Image (cartoon, helix red, strand yellow):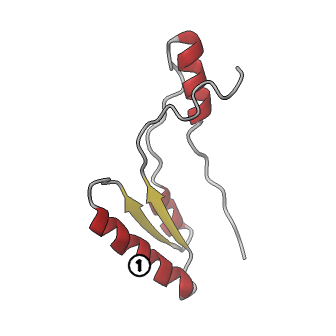
Amino acid sequence: MIAFELPHSPTDTINAQIVMFGDDVGCPLVRTDYHLAAEGFGGEGMILNDPKATGKTLKILKEAQQKALNGTAVCVNAHIGKTDFRKGSISV
């Protein structure tokens, strides 16, 4: 089995910087197309980016599960909304 790691958004750093300095300059990143990256590595990529489409979400998750059970590496890129869940949880 081979595994790959892709860079991800440092949301903790961004949140801490906004709280401490009132600015996120130099930190914001665009969303990463992890689903496309998975395809580049020979797997199957799927995206969930509409929180109101619960029927579509369930369909994609079931499809991903079936592909994984059949031996295909699958990446489901699930976009989530912003939250202050970890606000102030790290030190800068």
Residue located beneath label 1 in the image: 63
Question: In the rendered structure, which amino acid carries the disc numbered 1?
Answer: Glu
Residue 35: image location, x then y, percent? 46, 61
On-image quarter of the C terminus: top right
| Farthest front residue in view | 85
Residue 22: image location, x then y, percent? 50, 12
User: On the rendered structure, is 40 left or right of 63?
Assistant: right
Position above or below: 31 against 18? below
User: On the rendered structure, is 60 left or right of 17?
Assistant: left
* Circle 1: element type: helix
User: On the rendered structure, is 30 left or right of 51?
Assistant: right
On-image quarter of the N terminus: bottom right
Of residue 4 and residue 90, the one placed in the foreground of this image is 90
Position above or below: 56 against 71? above
User: On the rendered structure, is 86 left or right of 54?
Assistant: right
Q: Residue at x 46, y 58 (%)?
A: 77
Dot 1 alpha-carbon crowd within 10 angstroms: few under 14, some 14 to 19, many 20 or more:
some
Picture quadrant where residue 55 is located: bottom left
